[in-house]
Image (tube, helix red, strand yellow):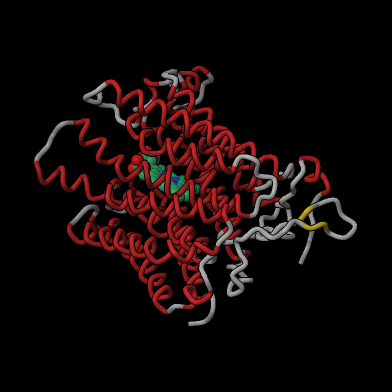
């Protein structure tokens, strides 16, 4: 296998599966208005296909690529890693088709178990190899891998509970969270934070962001159940964990926004991280407990994290797309419109307000669909600009290169995003004003 082959393989599959994630998301959104577009398939099965391809096929291989690029050249060139990348990619495609056609069934559950085994084997293989990476990506990536293993173990729990015949609603809900919380708050967020901080010289808060996320992630799960926990103390643990995640998101947002003043994918991720921080703190302080169970609001929150924080950071740091202004505006605007419409749909009185304005309640569904379609098209058209780690094989990316000054420019350029139109990483707050730098 060619040098860098495994990293490129992870990324090629990730790009393909991001396309499937976005298209299936728009398809699901359209089905709220015209159920017949599902063509006889069950909404729940398409939903599982969408969420599994997003987790197994898009986000996870993209973070594997970020981590694999930090491993020693010998590990990266090992044919085993190339085979692993193909197994993850093909397995994700199979999960997409399998869940769409038959939902949760013995073969899709078996396929999900294979994915968990692939995650654990990657974590075991990569752990030692990360020793040579710089301290920032190494600590984030190792923490992320630990959470991936915990999430993998958590994924088995619902099956165990089902087999033992337990029907307690809180136990059923918390066992679902045993996968979701470490996967999203631990694996995905720490993974993209590692990629971002590795190339960010102005990142002041890397350490507190890491610590708060590591400590707060698991306890935060106790706040994600609508059924009451057996002990009041668990609720307080959930509040404490969520406060930590909220503060971490605010600090991450502040760091991302300090990097550039230009309208960019980084800025979108920064604003979304700040919004997530505010939402976490609002819920943790008990100011919006009644809204926790509103489906449109929880879907809006989930996509705020996955579509507006995780996806832009992976597009930039893993796929290394070249974000041109128009497509960034279209993606950010589309995501904003979709999330805003979901927020209004779920907010008490939101639909009434619309009726008061003489608009039918379905207008918000149309708005969410339009925003989703614009965002999806913008992201998909960005993909061919991805550079798939051109310096792969040198072992340099995503190690942060020493900041240097471009001749005749006040803008400091860093490895990873060097010379990208619209996404210049600059260390000082005023440097973003210097505009686009084409460094290559
Ligand atoms: C244009 C982009 C997207 C659109 C239009 C979209 C749309 C949707 C829709 C309509 C649902 C079901 C909502 C419901 O049941 O009320 C959903 C669920 C979900 N989406 Fe997306 N999505 C998009 C992107 C993404 C991305 C990028 C990810 C992950 C990286 C993602 C992860 C998920 C997950 C995990 C669920 C399942 C939630 C649950 O079952 O509780 N989506 N999405």
User: Viewer-proximal residue, 146 or 336?
Assistant: 146
Q: Vertical placement of 205 versus 353: above or below?
A: below
285 with respect to 429 (left or right): left
Determine the image quadrant of residue 169: top left
Q: What residue sits 31% from the left and 53% below the top? A: 39
Residue 343 in the figure: left or right of residue 438:
left
Q: Position of residue 29 (x, y in %)?
A: 42, 44
Q: Quadrant of the C terminus?
A: bottom right
- Given the current orientation, which residue lies at the most extreme right position? 408
Q: Residue at x 52, y 71 (%)?
A: 72
In x, y percent, where is residue 254?
A: 64, 36
272 horizontally vs 153: left or right: right
Q: Position of residue 94 (x, y in %)?
A: 32, 65
Closest to the observer: 421 or 166? 166
Identify the residue at horizontal 58%, vertical 43% (top origin).
206
Number of on-image labels: 0
> Is residue 420 something that shows in the picture?
no
Quick one: which residue is furthest to the bottom in this view?
A: 1
User: Which image quarter has ligand 1?
Assistant: top left
In the rendered image, the vertical position of residue 193 relative to residue 279, given as above or below:
below
Residue 236 lies, with reference to residue 100, above or below; the image says above
Give residue 350's position: percent from left, percent from top: 47, 22
Up the image or down, 419 lies above or below 171; here it is below
Residue 267 visible? yes
User: Is residue 436 toward the left or the right of residue 379 in the image?
Assistant: right
């Amino acid at each position: 296998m060619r040098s860098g082959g495994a990293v490129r393989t992870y990324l090629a599959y990730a790009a393909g599966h991001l396309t499937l994630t976005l298209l299936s998301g728009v398809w699901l959104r359209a089905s709220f208005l015209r159920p017949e577009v599902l063509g006889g398939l069950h909404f729940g099965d398409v939903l599982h296909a969408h969420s599994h391809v997003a987790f197994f096929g898009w986000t996870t291989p993209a973070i594997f690529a970020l981590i694999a690029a930090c491993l020693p050249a010998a590990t990266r060139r090992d044919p085993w890693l190339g085979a692993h990348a193909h197994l993850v990619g093909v397995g994700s495609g199979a999960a997409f088709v399998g869940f769409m056609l038959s939902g949760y069934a013995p073969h899709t559950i078996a396929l999900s178990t294979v994915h968990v085994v692939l995650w654990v084997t990657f974590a075991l293989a990569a752990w030692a190899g990360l020793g040579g990476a710089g301290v920032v990506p190494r600590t984030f990536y190792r923490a992320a891998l630990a959470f991936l293993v915990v999430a993998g173990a958590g994924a088995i729990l619902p099956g165990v509970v089902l087999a033992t015949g337990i029907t307690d609603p809180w136990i059923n809900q918390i066992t679902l969270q045993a996968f979701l919380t470490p996967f999203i708050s631990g694996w995905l967020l720490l993974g993209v934070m590692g990629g971002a901080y590795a190339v960010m010289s102005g990142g002041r808060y890397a350490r507190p962001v890491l610590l708060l996320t590591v400590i707060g992630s698991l306890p935060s799960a106790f706040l994600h159940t609508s059924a009451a926990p057996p002990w009041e103390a668990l609720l307080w643990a959930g509040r404490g964990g969520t406060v930590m995640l909220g503060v971490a998101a605010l600090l991450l947002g502040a760091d991302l926004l300090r990097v550039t003043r230009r309208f960019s994918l980084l800025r979108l991720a920064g604003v979304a991280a700040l919004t997530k921080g505010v939402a976490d703190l609002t819920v943790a302080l008990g100011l919006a407990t009644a809204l926790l169970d509103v489906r449109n609001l929880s879907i809006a929150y989930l996509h705020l994290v996955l579509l507006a924080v995780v996806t832009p950071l992976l597009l930039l740091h893993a796929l290394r797309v070249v974000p041109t202004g128009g497509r960034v505006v279209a993606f950010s605007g589309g995501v904003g419109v979709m999330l805003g419409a979901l927020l209004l749909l779920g907010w008490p009185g939101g639909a009434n307000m619309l009726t008061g304005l003489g608009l039918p309640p379905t207008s918000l569904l149309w708005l969410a669909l339009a925003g989703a379609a614009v965002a999806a098209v913008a992201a998909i058209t960005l993909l061919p600009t991805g550079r798939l780690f051109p310096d792969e094989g040198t072992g340099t990316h995503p190690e942060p290169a020493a900041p240097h000054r471009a001749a005749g420019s006040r803008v400091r350029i860093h490895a990873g995003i060097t010379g990208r139109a619209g996404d210049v990483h600059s260390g000082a707050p005023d440097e973003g004003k210097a505009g686009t730098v084409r460094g290559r």
